[in-house]
Amino acid sequence: MSFPHPTRRHAMLGTGALALAGVRRAAAAPAPIRQGYQTNMWGMPTYYLMRSGLLQKHGVAFQDFAVPSGNITMQQMVARQVDLGTFAGPSLLIGNARGGLVAVALIEYVGKTVRVMGRADLHMTKIEDLRGKKVANQTGSSIGNIFVNKIAPAHGLHKGDYEEIRMNVNDMVSAMLAKTVDAMVNVEPYNAIAEDHGIANTILDFSGVDRLPVFMAATPDFVHAQPDALVAYLKAWLDVAKDFKDSPDKVAGVVGAFYASKGYTMTPATLKKALSRVQVDPGFPPAATLAPYMQEQAEALIGAKKIKTVPAYDSYMLGQFMAKARA
């Protein structure tokens, strides 16, 4: 059977079809990952990930969204303004209840980065000394929830026994210096800065209460739409862990430049002290290790009327993507 010779019109249609196919292929390319991160020390491994070139090495495009603390990233994710972000267990559970957020990796342990600190001139040495005092707290954050729901009650302090001053963590050192608050529940590097400048002293280190695992959370929409990009993204995180272990000076250079750009003055020793309190270890611990901890966090949030039920562990802890990244 013979076919008619293509006319100019047919050729143009064919060219147009190929052009449209090219447009479709371009449109189908994965959108840049919208990465949220907090500007305290918890977010610096994520900041380093984005500034190290490791995401580009694994073919991952991104946009970054900086906020003072992880609970704000969580709110952005619930509103579907951000795809990925780090925060601790309480914020993960609240984000799951409000917007179906899931964990795709445990990125770091940060219990040593969080302290309750008092103004140096007040000479407070124990949590009980906060009675009647003004305590700066990032209300709604994971560390804020742990202080209010767990630490303070364990020392006989309940709401009303101290005045909670709602404040972003990056504003607390200035408030301490101005003596508008008496104490703060804060995170690195702000604790190290306050300590080294003689503004505050440590009352309690969170690591004795909670190792504070920090999770990389994702929206269910992103997990469904870009599973391959997620695996490539987690491969980059494994490279970040190597740099934190083997190239600490390189990491300190990137992180130090970030804080210098924000107007914070830190000596190299102060920066290294703050960074040393972050244990970067991307992975996914077995459920037997993590599930009891998350159960405890959920029950505390239920008691505080932050969530209504304990979610099924496997419904929001998705370890399969990190397993593929390690394969």
Image (tube, rainbow, N blue to C red):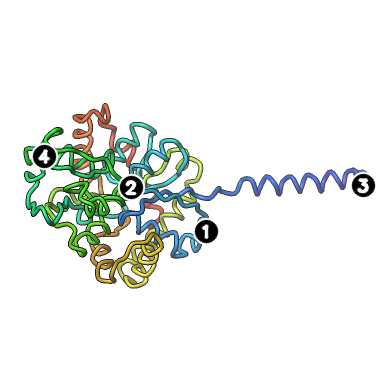
Rendered location of residue 168, percent (x, y): 31, 46
Mark whose residue sits in front, 1 or 2: 2
Q: Which residue is mark 2?
A: 69
Q: Which residue is mark 1?
A: 59
Mark whose residue sits in front, 3 or 2: 2
Q: Which residue is mark 4?
A: 132
- Quick one: SS at disc 4? loop
Callout 2, which amino acid? Ser
Callout 3, which amino acid? Arg
* Left or right of 163 on screen, residue 5: right
Q: Which residue is mark 3?
A: 8
Mark whose residue sits in front, 4 or 2: 4
Q: Count of labels shown?
A: 4
Gap between marks 4 and 1 measured at Cα: 54 Å
Mark whose residue sits in front, 3 or 4: 4
Regarding residue 239, the answer to whether it shows in the image is no
Q: Classify 10 Å Cα crowding around label 1: few (below 14), some (14-19), many (20 and above).
A: few
Callout 1, which amino acid? Gly
Mark whose residue sits in front, 3 or 1: 1
